[in-house]
Amino acid sequence: MFELINAASLLSPLFAVAVAIVVFLRRHERKDASGQRSLGLFALGFLAFGVLSFLLGFWVVNEFSCRGAQYAECALGGLLIGGPLGFTVATSAYVYFWSKNGKRPDTKSQMEPS
């Protein structure tokens, strides 16, 4: 089981980045010029959440794996498992909420008299 988690954790950030690109491109196609969000702000938010969650995952896993350890190899658990999984979870949540948020109301139905 540990080998599966170790292998999946290393590839999960690539999956999160690929999903973020697909979601941004799909949202970009559906919106007109007046409602577009910028790629720069999306990337900045994505990377900010990703880096902070990577550091948090690294720190949390190191706290658990380095208890009573005599050597620095215990930090590899945080670097290879906790950090990438933290990055993936946080950026996936960011992409999900970004894709669900920001929908403009239907102005046509609001202009019709009741």
Image (cartoon, rainbow, N blue to C red):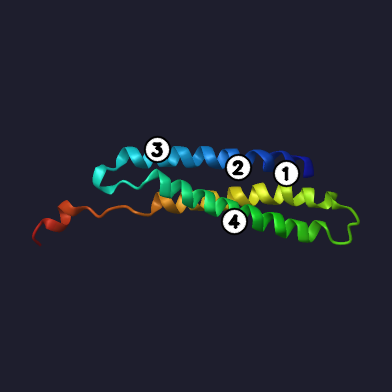
Q: Nearer the viewer, residue 3 or 11?
A: 11
Q: Quadrant of the N terminus?
A: top right
What is the C-alpha distance between the residues marked 1 and 2? Answer: 13 Å
* Residue on which disc 1 sits: 5
Mark 4 neighbour density, 10 Å: few (under 14) some (14–19) many (20 or more): some
**Which comes sooner in the sequence, label 4 or label 1?**
1
Amino acid of disc 1: Ile
What is the C-alpha distance between the residues marked 3 and 1? Answer: 30 Å
Please name which of the two marks, 2 or 4, marks the residue nearer to the observer: 4
* Residue on which disc 2 sits: 13
Residue 87 position within the rendered picture, expressed as x and y whole percent measured from the top left: 60, 49
Residue displayed at 16% across by 58% down:
110
* Residue on which disc 4 sits: 52
Q: Are marks 4 and 1 in contact (CB under 8 Å)?
A: no
Residue displayed at 31% across by 46% down:
36
Residue 48 shown left or right of residue 99 in the figure: right
Residue 50 position within the rendered picture, expressed as x and y whole percent measured from the top left: 57, 51
